[in-house]
Image: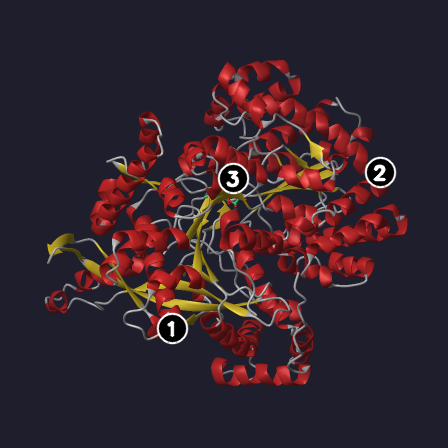
Amino acid sequence: MTEITAPKSPVTADQFADEIREQLKYTQNVTPEQATAADVYVAASKAVRNHLADAWFKTQADTVNGNTKAVGYFSAEFLMGKQLENALLNAGLTDQFDSAVEALGFQPKDIIDAEYEPGLGNGGLGRLAACFIDSLASLGVPAFGYGIQYKYGIFKQTFDENGKQVETPDYWLNNEEPWGHIDYNRDQKVSFGGEVVEENGKKVWKPAWSVRAVPVDYLVPGYKSQRVNTLRLWTAKSYDEFDLLAFNRSEYMDAVKPQVKAENISKILYPEDSTKVGKELRLEQQYFFVSASLHDAIRVFYPGQDKPDLTTFPNKITFQLNDTHPVIGIPELMRILIDEYDYDWDTAWDITVKTFNYTCHTLLPEALEVWPASLIGELLPRHLEIIEKINEQFEDELKGKGVADETIERMRIYTGDSVRMAYLATYGGSHVNGVAALHSQLLKDMTLKDFSDVYPSKFTNVTNGVTPRRFVKLANPGLSDLITEGLGTDKWLSDLELLEGLAPLAKDDEFVKKFAAVKAANKHAFVGFAKDHYGLDIDENTMFNTMVKRLHEYKRQSLKILAVISKYAAIKNGTVSADDILPRTVFFGAKAAPGYYLAKMTIQLINNVSKVVNNDPDVKGKLAVHMLPNYNIEMAQNLIPATELDEQISQAGKEASGTGNMKFALNGALTVGTLDGANVEIRERVGAENFFLFGMTVDEVEKLYADGYDPAKYYEADPRLKQAIDLVANGTFSNGDRNAYAPLVADWLTKDWFMTLADFSAYADIQAEIEKLYRDPLEWNRKALLNVANSGFFSSDRSIEDYLERIWHTGPLA
Ligand code: CRA
């Protein structure tokens, strides 16, 4: 690991206060007396941004002029979270900020909280992209994040009086947004539709319409690296402000139609996650940002050159395709090279394959994007031709390698009806990686088996990671201080495996008690947060047990809620004595895709179980359940450090990695989980004795499918499960309405695709072990501390180092 020097403290607190005053005066146009927390937030953000400018210019210049290959991270999502606190930390300005805003008569926390969280991502994939660009900058690797500045981020979630999820638009740009700089002078033209004609023996695309892609630049400061990279998010603008002809006829609405159509492209983030969407607008979005980004990279690396030598392109930058969403970039680069720069096919193909790599984030076959050829043909006719030709070349190559006809048939990129984007990415790039060891193995054995057989050396693994700056230092200052005390240094923030140095301290009871005190303080703080934000009264003397993630059947929130119901029933029936009950507060946080019926019904069920349980005097002080609305990064930063038991209970073989699991382990929660995704590696590292494992393995799941799975058998076999499902079916959580959850109950009893029922008994049984350990606080905390000590591997810095070594073959700027 290269030694990173701390940034020079560039200003004093007084100077920083003056800079904020200046921003208030000249950009906010308010006096310090008039200023609200929101004003000070904007002023402070602009002041911090100014501090980053020089390092940003220098990083850009070194990126272009140096001979270190850069990374272009192509992602439809960047779930950044609030920016100010992170920018202060990385710029080394936290202390100055604290004193400066106090001098202005404000509390630092109120200023930090005044920021509106941008939600330009759905969940794990988008947050991973944000962690990765933080790590790239912190490691000093020249990089660009390329994506879309959606006008509406992920919807805001509330619940109606029946406990149903209600989605409202998240118009985040309604609030002043000091971070993004819109650069009208670096725009790109992106075209769609029309036809391909032949002119002088050359294919020429005559598009029907175009939009103007305008970049909005966000600074990505590295932690103590003196480097600031760029996140460039494109926004769509119309070229034709309005159609004058229509306007003259007073058809005002018609006059603005083209503008509306163009600007719709960057209007909304699709609220889907691990499910395919397959809508025209989505393909427009994908092509929009990828086309603009490729042209932008050529502009950046070959400034002012009309005829650049693009055979050097793969030495300048390597593009990582974050899932299949940006894969249309492969035929787009081919088109640019052939049509715009006159390269022959083979040269273009060589450049393209060298330039791209693909990360697959899923195991659900239905989540791999497949586009109807007719849609691509309509929207991008030239690209469809190129894809057909890529497919021809691919089939010839396979024949040449002696691959059997029926295998070739299965592997086709272009079937005549549709285009399989994962296959295109695998063939059209140099490397393919999964996001955890198990996931990468399953990609090779199942999802992309044919490809791995033919191109074994393309396949590799990079286990996901999370940035310790945001998810330990900012989220958990108490633990961070204790870690620094324990290690005698704060270097762990840029070399997380140093946490191993805490392991011997797990034998030191005094240190373990300090660790327990930090957790208790975090619980106390979360009680305050929950009171302020949701008006909840939470008993901090209960075990805090959390399941936060998107709502998906495969993640099995159903399993958790059925276990909660079963526990509730046991208390009510007196099958457990009062003394035997370990008081617990169960927190759920989850958004469901708006069109995902069973997921939304599960949310409704959780809300109504919560109502019944929390209002039942018989269980008061023993069990409480809360479905917290609008799970987002801010909530994660507050809830994860307060959590004692984390749930990672997906069906084995379905969660590609998970990253919440890493955040919890790093913040000293114990995990109850299945052998799925990165859980496997977490358990390996923290030790089997410090992890609550239950449930079927991938092989057992496969076998049970093959043997014929009958969920009803499990319902009959375990009285706890039967009782829990009966309570849902008999209207206990729907004011006596037996139909309210009928579809959910029917699904459990007849389909249960993710085998919740089959894993229920094991899950219910392991609760006794969990509760036994919890009753011994010193032992519990010892194990929790060992989770922290042994989770350093799950830093996104390590993930990036793996990408550098295995895929990108580049490194930090000199
Ligand atoms: N939903 C996977 O399901 C994984 C993240 C990041 C996901 C998670 O297990 O941790 O990606 N997949 O690698 C995805 O979005 C399109 O597929 C996710 O966030």
Residue at position x 77%, y 30% in the image: 769
Residue type (three-letter) at the residue carrying disc 3: Leu
Mark 3 residue element = loop
Q: Is residue 176 visible?
A: no
Q: Quadrant of residue 610?
A: top right
Q: Which residue is mark 2?
A: 776
The residue wearing badge 3 is 551
Mark 1 crowd level (few <14, some 14–19, many ≥20, 10 Å Cα)? few
Question: Which of the labelled discs sits on residue 314, or is there none?
Answer: none
When asked about the image quadrant of residue 402, the answer is top left
In front here: 526 or 732? 526
What amino acid type should be assigned to the residue bearing mark 1?
Answer: Asp
| Measured Cα–Cα span from mark 1 to mark 3 | 37 Å
Q: Secondary structure at mark 1?
A: loop
Q: Which residue is mark 1?
A: 183
* Residue mark closest to the camera, 2 vs 1: 1
Task: Give the quadrant of the N terminus.
Answer: bottom right
Q: Earlier in the sequence, mark 2 or mark 1?
A: 1
Q: Quadrant of the C terminus?
A: bottom right
How far apart are the two marked residues, 2 and 1, measured between alpha carbons?
58 Å
Mark 2 Cα within 10 Å, few/some/many (few <14, many 20+)? few
Is residue 267 toward the left or the right of residue 544 in the image? left
Mark 3 crowd level (few <14, some 14–19, many ≥20, 10 Å Cα) = many
| Callout 2 touching callout 3 (CB < 8 Å) | no
- The reply to whether discs 2 and 1 touch (Cβ–Cβ < 8 Å) is no
Tell me where residue 495 appears, x and y as whole percent.
Answer: 69, 58
Q: In the rendered image, which quarter is residue 403 located in?
A: top left
